[in-house]
């Protein structure tokens, strides 16, 4: 991400050096995998928040600790499992939506973070946090600046994944693609890795 190399530009323009992204789409579409890949490629710390397990004071403590490592990536995964709009729907139900918002963009600015929030239920998100409008633009820039819809993978994307696992075995690649209608990215990746492992063990008997 070019953002991580833009600190001086942000400071020169008088902007907070922070960014937020919403990734939404069906279960298994690869939202978390995409975030993990980005963090690995740019080599920054990645902090995953287990919102269901946190009370307000725990969230604040963990947030402050993560921010101290900036630049870094912070992830709220499957926020729809914790909140429906502003109501905490988790079994523990200790974290308040107000506490979350105050940390994300409260009086004390948090800089040097790239916040990523994933959800399988876009209708559960509150507009105060940021949801895509009819043009796909976030309702709350400064909290979640960009919104990405991660849908089911197409044939070209399947071919990339299958070729990675089954390099040089075009017949197997085409067969897996043909038989994978309705698969999510996670399911298709697992099918390919299992096939590759099967071939590996068969070769090394």
Image: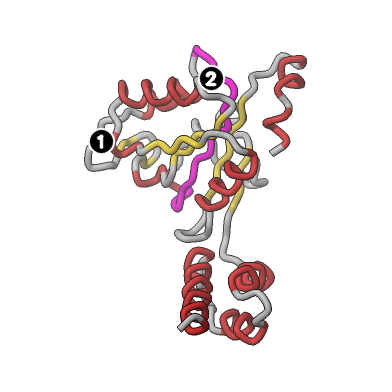
Marks 1/2: CA distance?
A: 25 Å
Above or below 137: residue 159: below
Above or below 158: residue 74: above
Which residue is at a point 54% across and 16% down the rendered structure image? Answer: 109
Residue 6 in the magenta stretch? The answer is no
- Judged left or right of residue 166, residue 100 is left
Of the pair 146 and 10, the residue shown nearer to us: 10
Q: Which mark is residue 93?
A: 1
The secondary element bearing badge 2 is classed as: loop
Which residue is at a point 48% across and 84% down the rendered structure image? Answer: 202
| Stretch of the chain drawn in magenta | 107-122
Above or below 111: residue 139: below
Does residue 139 appear in this view?
A: no
Q: Which mark is residue 172?
A: none
Q: Which mark is residue 110?
A: 2
Of marks 1 and 2, which one's residue comes earlier in the chain? 1
């Amino acid at each position: 991400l070019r953002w991580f190399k833009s600190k001086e530009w942000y400071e020169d323009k008088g902007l907070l050096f922070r960014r937020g992204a919403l990734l939404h789409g069906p279960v298994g579409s690869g939202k978390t995998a995409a975030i993990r890949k980005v963090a690995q490629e740019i080599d920054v710390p990645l902090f995953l928040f287990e919102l269901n397990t946190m009370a307000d004071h725990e969230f604040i403590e963990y947030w402050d600790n993560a921010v101290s490592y900036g630049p870094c990536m912070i992830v709220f995964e499957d926020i729809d499992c914790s909140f429906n709009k502003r109501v905490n729907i988790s079994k523990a139900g200790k974290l308040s939506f107000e506490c979350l918002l105050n940390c994300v963009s409260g009086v004390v600015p948090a800089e040097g973070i790239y916040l990523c929030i994933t959800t399988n239920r876009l209708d559960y998100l509150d507009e105060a946090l940021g949801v895509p409008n009819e043009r796909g633009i976030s309702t709350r820039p400064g909290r979640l600046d960009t919104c990405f819809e991660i849908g089911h993978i197409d044939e070209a994307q399947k071919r990339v994944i299958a070729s990675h696992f089954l390099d040089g075995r075009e017949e197997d690649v085409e067969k897996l693609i043909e038989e994978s209608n309705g698969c999510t990215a996670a399911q298709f990746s697992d099918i390919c890795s299992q096939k590759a492992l099967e071939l590996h063990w068969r070769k090394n008997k």
